[in-house]
């Protein structure tokens, strides 16, 4: 009897974009750390965060390291129109999942070497702008910016 084996190697499927569990409204000011700027309060490491899905137009969300670091389950930055910027000034954002900067998103790391995005082995897909200025650091740990 003739025996034949077939082995098929498949690349892992990428998960669909996460559903937003906390979205930026900017109702109070431009600070990441103001609870009233978010639909579910200041994000934590379990939330899939979106900036630009509810509030479009051109604006900047500021994550100032003097107020602490930030953690998210994932981040989607950029909406349907305008430019939504996340400016990390001397701070750290920890990504707990694959994240995206869309065509209308801008991710700016600045602050004399202490603005960091910690990828933690995940991918930051960039279709917009990821900018490192004034000595900011793009990533720590393993991970990929594509």
Image (tube, rainbow, N blue to C red):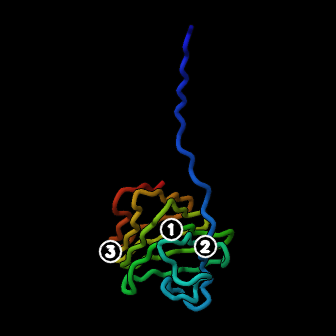
Residue at the extreme front:
1
Of residues 118 and 112, the one nearer the viewer is 118
Between circles 1 and 3, the one closer to the viewer is 1
Identify the residue at image location x=31%, y=72%.
113
Q: Which mark is residue 127?
A: none
CA gap between label 3 and label 2 equals: 28 Å
Residue at 62% x, 70% y: name it. 20
Which numbered marker is on residue 21?
2
Q: Identify whether 139 is placed above or below 14.
A: below
Labelled pair 1, 3 in contact (Cβ < 8 Å): no
Of residue 79 and residue 6, the one placed in the foreground of this image is 6
Look at the image and tell me in which quarter the N terminus lies.
top right
Say which quarter of the image contains residue 116: bottom left
Q: In the displayed image of the protein, which residue is found farthest to the top?
A: 1
Q: Position of residue 30 (x, y in %)?
A: 53, 86
Q: Nearer the viewer, residue 142 or 80?
A: 142
Crowd class of label 2 (few under 14; some 14 to 19; many from 20; radius 10 Å) = some
Residues at marks 1 and 3, CA–CA distance in whole angstroms: 22 Å
Quadrant assignment, res 88? bottom left
Residue at label 1? 73
Indicate which label's residue lies in the foreground, 3 or 2.
2
In the shown orientation, is residue 134 left or right of residue 106? left
Indicate the position of residue 141 as horizontal and vertical percent values: 34, 60
Circle 3 SS class:
loop
Residue projecting furthest to the bottom: 28
* 2 or 1: tag closer to the N-terminus: 2
SS at circle 2: loop
Going from N to C along the chain, the mark reached first, 3 or 2, is 2
Identify residue for label 3.
114
């Amino acid at each position: 009897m003739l025996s034949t084996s077939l082995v098929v190697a498949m690349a892992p499927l990428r998960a669909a974009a996460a559903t937003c569990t906390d979205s930026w409204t900017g109702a109070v000011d431009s600070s990441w750390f103001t609870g009233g700027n978010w639909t579910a309060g200041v994000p934590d490491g379990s939330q899939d965060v979106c900036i630009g899905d509810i509030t479009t137009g051109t604006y900047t969300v500021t994550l100032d390291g003097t107020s602490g670091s930030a953690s998210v389950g994932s981040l989607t930055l950029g909406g349907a129109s305008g430019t939504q910027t996340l400016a990390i000034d001397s701070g750290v954002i920890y990504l707990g999942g694959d994240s995206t900067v869309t065509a209308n998103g801008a991710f700016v790391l600045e602050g004399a070497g202490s603005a960091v995005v910690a990828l933690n082995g995940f991918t930051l897909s960039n279709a917009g702008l990821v900018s490192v200025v004034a000595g900011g650091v793009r990533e720590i740990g393993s991970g990929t910016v594509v």
